[in-house]
Image (cartoon, helix red, strand yellow):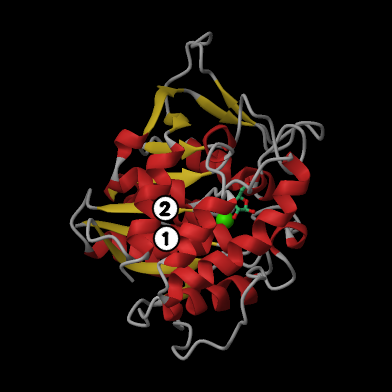
Amino acid sequence: PRKIIIDTDPGQDDAAAIMLALASPELEVLGVTAVAGNVPLALTARNAGIVTEICGRSDIAVYAGADRPLARKLVTAEHVHGKTGLDGIDLFEPARPLETVHAVDFIIETLRREPAGTVTLCPLGPLTNIATVIERAPDVVERIKEIVLMGGGYFEGGNITPSAEFNIYVDPEAAKIVFGTGVAITMMPLDVTHKVLTTRVRVERLRANGNRPSVAMADMLEFFERFDEEKYGTDGGPLHDPTVIAWLIDPGIFSGRSCNVEIETGSDLTLGATVVDWWKVTGRTENAFVVRDVDADRFFDLFIERVGRL
Ligand code: BDR
Ligand code: CA
């Protein structure tokens, strides 16, 4: 199986990504690292432990990382995810305590220990932890197999400002570092995730699996989609983060192209914008595979079947 580290700020859709990964034999989750994002770090770290426990996988260690962006005040998204970050289910204190090692140290140590080119990083929140790894231990950069991340938006615009997607907006300086390292990056922007809609029919199919993770996820999605339904006028809301995991399992569900992506860190108006040179009008080096389309039915077939296995 492919070795991954999930760096996350749960978040109902982060929880969906963790579940999909833990249900999939193609992937080996080496650890889950938490970052401040949707809600403050104490909550994202706890939520990660709750999700692994709901999956019956308390063997998975959770490490807490950065509690704020590199250079800015933390912006959170309780308006989307609720006060706890995982509104929709009854929360509890996870049985397995958080690791005492910092997330950044865990990622660095893991990359040094595992054979070079075998570990994929899956960031699902602001890129603070990943940028800190790159700055603190430049030697590990070439040992990363690939970074597959949820973030950005180009044709679709932004969701936290007209120009910026939440994960990139919260820590644009971190995103700039990550996109500037030369590591292979695959990016799942809003252009894709806004096509992955949690319709009533899909959520009910998931619930009908009947196992604890499926029912918990259906409950979470019912909370989560309320916000997006009102906002976007669609049946169901976008399910962002599990696209990252689905890509690793079955990239044939998606399509996109390699291009140059730069991050805006200067302008107040467009802070955190991902400027994608889709039409290759600059000579700038291609630094990311930007996914733009998805077969949402195939995605949900995969997602529902896999979470049903847990
Ligand atoms: C991203 O922001 C968060 O609210 C979601 O978990 C997802 O990672 C979408 O913009
Ligand atoms: Ca997230």
SS state under label 2: strand
Q: Is residue 13 visible?
A: yes
Depth check: give the residue in front, 74 or 58. Answer: 58
Q: Where's residue 167, x and y in %?
A: 62, 48
SS state under label 1: strand
Give the alpha-carbon distance from disc 2 to disc 1, as whole Å.
Answer: 5 Å
Query: Where ligand 2 lies, by quadrant?
Result: bottom right
Q: Quadrant of residue 303?
A: bottom left
Depth check: give the residue in front, 160 or 233. Answer: 233
Q: Which residue is mark 2?
A: 122
- Whichever of callouts 2 and 1 sits on the residue coming sooner in the sequence is 1
Residue occupying the far top of the picture = 281
Relative height, residue 155 to residue 209 (above, below): above
Tell me if label 2 and label 1 are in contact, CB under 8 Å: yes
Relative height, residue 236 to residue 163 (above, below): below
Q: Which residue is mark 1?
A: 6
Q: Quadrant of residue 298?
A: top left
Callout 1 environment at 10 Å: few (<14), some (14 to 19), or many (20+)?
Answer: many
The amino acid marked with disc number 2 is Cys
Q: Along the horizontal axis of the image, is 138 left or right of 135? A: left
Q: Quadrant of residue 209?
A: bottom left
Q: Is residue 104 visible?
A: no
**Quarter of the image where the N terminus is located:** bottom left
Residue 24: mark: none
**Quarter of the image where the C terminus is located:** bottom left
The residue drawn where x is 48% and y is 78% is 49
